[in-house]
Image: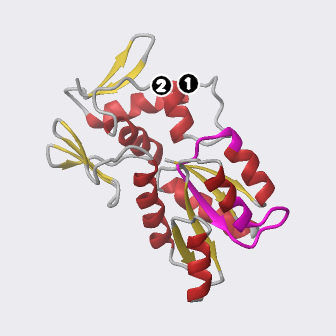
């Protein structure tokens, strides 16, 4: 899942970004509305975590622009303005969800995951391929009932592949959806992560490499 966090409080922005990355998401962080609009022009984000009170361009204006442009990006408004009127106003602007500060991070992460499931084609809440089961909410993977501990990027790569069973997913697509904008497209990051993931999942392999194409989960 690709997420853009827009929050002008730099420490909070970094904290949210780090927490969502630990959840296996690819996260970019900006601190004003102008940067947010520039990023939305370039990257197909699944979810936008948006503070309403932003410099340069307000969060309300960013939310309006998302709707006007017809972007599939889901918007989670994050703000200290928590009255009923504030929430209604934010949702009427086009926000898909509204969370007031202060908040508990597990709730924020759960809301982002829920919005991510709505941003594209419907994805089952639990993903399965052969005897492998991945539960995004519980952050667990099992194979034949045996727990398989995965690092966040390994988990995110597996989730992306299992959500597209039988389809060939290119390394470029994995880099775009699992890593953030700081990732170097010329590194062997994807190949290395796939190697570790396959080793942890064991035999028989459920992820195959398609020559000059990419990777595929299942047949």
Foreground residue among 150 and 115: 115
Q: Is residue 30 above or below residue 157?
A: below
How many numbered marks appear?
A: 2
Q: Name the residue under label 2.
A: 191
- What residue sits 33% from the left and 40% below the top? 163
Question: Could you tell whether 190 is left or right of 161 in the image?
Answer: right
* Residue pictured at 32% horizontal, 31% vertical: 199
User: Which structural element holds mark 2?
Assistant: helix
What residue would you read off at disc 1?
A: 188
Residue 53: say if magenta: yes
Q: Which residue is drawn at 81% across and 62% down?
A: 57
User: Residue 171 vs residue 136: left or right?
Assistant: right
- Quarter of the view holding residue 48: bottom right
Counting from the top left corner in percent of width and height, residue 212 is at 45, 11
Residue 190 screen position, x and y as percent = 50, 29
In the structure shown, which secondary structural element does the residue marked by tag 1 occupy? loop
**Would residue 39 appear left or right of 48 to someone viewing this image?**
right
Q: Magenta stretch: residue 49 in it?
A: yes
Mark 1 crowdedness (10 Å alpha carbons): few <14, some 14-19, many ≥20: few
Residue closer to the observer: 50 or 70: 70
Mark 1–mark 2 CB contact (< 8 Å): yes
Q: Which residue lies furthest to the top in this view?
A: 211
The span shown in magenta is 41-62
């Amino acid at each position: 899942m690709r997420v853009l966090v827009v929050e002008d409080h730099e420490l909070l922005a970094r904290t949210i970004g780090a927490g969502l990355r630990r959840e296996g998401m690819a996260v970019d962080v900006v601190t004003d509305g102008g940067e947010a609009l520039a990023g939305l022009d370039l990257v197909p984000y699944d979810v936008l975590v948006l503070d309403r009170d932003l410099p340069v361009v307000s969060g309300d204006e960013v939310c309006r622009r998302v709707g006007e442009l017809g972007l599939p990006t889901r918007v989670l408004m994050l703000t200290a303005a928590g009255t009923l009127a504030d929430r209604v106003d934010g949702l009427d602007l086009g926000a898909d969800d509204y969370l007031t500060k202060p908040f508990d991070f597990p709730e924020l992460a759960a809301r982002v995951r829920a919005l991510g499931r709505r941003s594209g084609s419907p994805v089952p809440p639990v993903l399965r391929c052969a005897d492998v089961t991945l539960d995004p909410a519980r952050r667990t993977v099992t194979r034949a009932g045996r727990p398989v501990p995965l690092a966040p990027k390994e988990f995110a790569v597996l989730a992306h592949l299992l959500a597209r069973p039988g389809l060939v997913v290119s390394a470029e697509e994995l880099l775009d959806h699992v890593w953030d904008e700081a990732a170097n497209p010329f590194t062997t990051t994807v190949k290395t992560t796939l190697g570790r993931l396959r080793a942890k999942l064991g035999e028989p392999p459920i992820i195959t490499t398609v020559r000059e194409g990419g990777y595929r989960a299942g047949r």
